[in-house]
Structures are given as structure tokens and as C-alpha cells.
Image (cartoon, grey):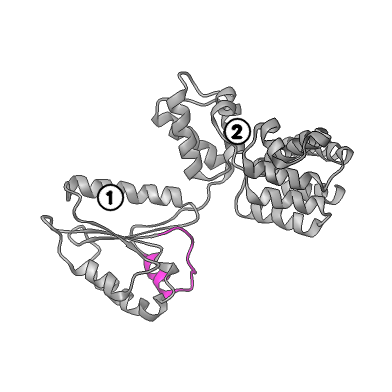
Amino acid sequence: MLFFYYGQDSFRANQKVRAIKNKFKEKVDPSGHNVQHLDGELISPDDFFQAVSVMGFLADKKLIIIKNIFDNKKLKDWQDQLIKFLDGQADSPDENYIIFLQTSKPDSRLKLYKKLSKLKFSEEFEILKPVQLKTWVQKQFSKHSKTINLPALELLITYVGNNLWQINNEINKLVSFTKNDVSEEDIRALVQAKVDENIFNLIDAIGNKNKALALQLIEEKLDSGVNHQYILTMIIRQYRLLIKAKSLGSKAKNYFALMQVLKVPKFIAQKTYQQSALYKLDQLKKIYKYLLYLDEKFKSSSGQEKILFAKMINDL
């Protein structure tokens, strides 16, 4: 039986594979001796064909999970051989279960992709859109018999972005440490806002008056599916730290002093200390005021995120 799960949302793809794996162990292989994982990026034809040809141990079939075979640099040398094998499979429950898991979207021109994408059990997992993401998060809380109010839900997504791996970790933390329904106060107390390296690069670009680079960094984030409110929240967060650092004046002699006063990790203190030299205090206050204005505009101008960010960069 053949399966192909792929896409940028590796969390949901992995969940799908895990569900099949659990069902296989329950129905076929309680001992767990017949589940084999192969690193598709490194396997050779011999590795693959040996795995699929060996019989199960105390079971009539095996489950073979091959991860990221499209990242195999030598795939083009043996994909025809692999496709011929797949063509010979009946794709029935009586055969070995073979799962191809790809944590990205492969080149659609590849022959192997064309073959796998036509399988009965083939599914692409794209990055969830904002509305889909909210629904998904609510369902995860429901599984734990918890609810989360809308402001808290939006704040959680703002803090974490659309990385389901991190959101899932935060959800597990929240359901473990909250007695009642999850609130904004719970999010602020328990969820660590993700700090993206690109946010620091963006602040550097703005400080150095490199508008082209600043716009490029924002567009890359938006195009990859990162929530615009998350981007703005992280920018505001960093400028707030810069204002605090600049206001310290001579008291902030080094990044270690910022760590102590601002109570931030070493990496953030180092970047904040370096970036504070790019700005004057009145300039930082002007930028911060503009960012708050932009935050209000986002709430009333849906679909205009790129335009508003471009105007921000041009005006700063």
C-alpha cells in the first residue's frame, strides 16, 4: 500500500504519518518490530530495494517510511528504477505499507513526483491560511477539553506565527498549566514570543536606510505565509527594547548590562546593544509612534498589508 504526503506544513504531514504508523502497530505489528525509517536524502537504490523486499518479522507485512527522498542528489540516476517498482505494486493492504514523506513541495516536473501525486493516498499539506490556522488551534484545545477566547487566540498566533510545531508545544504547555479556559493573561505569562533572526536583519536595514533590503525581507516573510500581525508585533517589540536601551544612556555600557536591566536573553541583548548605535532616541520614538499607527491601520485595512509595510519603510 502506497502513501505520499508532502508540503511546507511538515507538522500536519508528520501527524498523518504518525496516525498510519499507530494504526499499523495496532492492527498488524503490536511488537513494533516491522516499522522501518529510511533517510531518503541519503539512501541508495540498494537500501530501498532491500528494505521493501525483506519480509516482516512475525508479521505478514512491514511499514517503511522514507523521508525526503526528493532531496536525494542521486535520485535522477535511479528514479526510473523506483517508478518501475511502484508500477508493479497492486497498492493494496495485502502488501507492505510504503510511505513517502516530503517536508517540502517537490519539483512538479519530476517523474517520481508525477507518479506519487497520482496515488490514491496522496496529499499536499500547505501552510494554513489565517482563518484555517485559527480553526486548527481551536480544535487542538478542544481535544484537551479546553477553549480559548478570540483575543487570546489572536495573541497566541501573533506571538508564535504559523509554525504548527511551536504552536503545538505552546498548546500543550497552556493546557497543562491553566485550570480554566485560556485567556490573554495566560498567553502573556506562559508563551515565549518567537524572535526571528530576520526581524533583527530588518531592524538593521531600516537603521542603515537600506529600504530595498527592508522591503525584500518583509515581502519574503509575507510570501512564505507568515502572519502580517506577527511581523509587526515582533518589529514593535524590538523597537520598544531599543527605546529602553537608548534611554539608559551611559548605564548601558555593554550588552551584559542590557541583559540585567531589560531581562532578555543574551542573543537579544547583543543585537539590541548593536542596533541602538544606529538610532537616536527621538528617531526611535518617531518610528515607534508610526508602528502603533500602522497597527491600527492593519485592523481596518484587510488585504493591504504589503502596501502598508512598503509605505512604512518609505516613510521611516
In this view, the residue farthest toward the bottom is 77
Does any portion of residue 278 appear in the rendered image?
yes
Q: Position of residue 287 (x, y in %)?
A: 83, 40
Q: Are marks 1 and 2 in contact (CB under 8 Å)?
A: no
In this view, the residue farthest toward the left is 58
- Residue 233 is left or right of residue 115, and the answer is right
Q: Residues within 10 Å of mark 2 (few under 14, many from 20)?
A: some
Residue visible at 21% across and 48% down in the picture? 25
According to the picture, the residue beneath numbered tag 1 turns out to be 21
SS under mark 2? helix
The front one of 206 and 26 is 206
- Residue 78 is left or right of residue 90, and the answer is right
According to the picture, the residue beneath numbered tag 2 turns out to be 154
Residue visible at 30% across and 75% down in the picture? 45
- Residue 85 is left or right of residue 7, and the answer is left
Q: Is residue 27 magenta?
A: no
Q: Which residues are the magenta region? A: 102-118
The front one of 273 and 197 is 273
Q: Which mark is residue 308?
A: none
Q: Position of residue 157 (x, y in %)?
A: 58, 37
Q: Residues within 10 Å of mark 1 (few under 14, many from 20)?
A: some
- Residue 289 is left or right of residue 8, and the answer is right
Q: Amino acid at mark 1?
A: Lys
Q: Amino acid at mark 2?
A: Glu
Q: Position of residue 138 (x, y in %)?
A: 48, 32
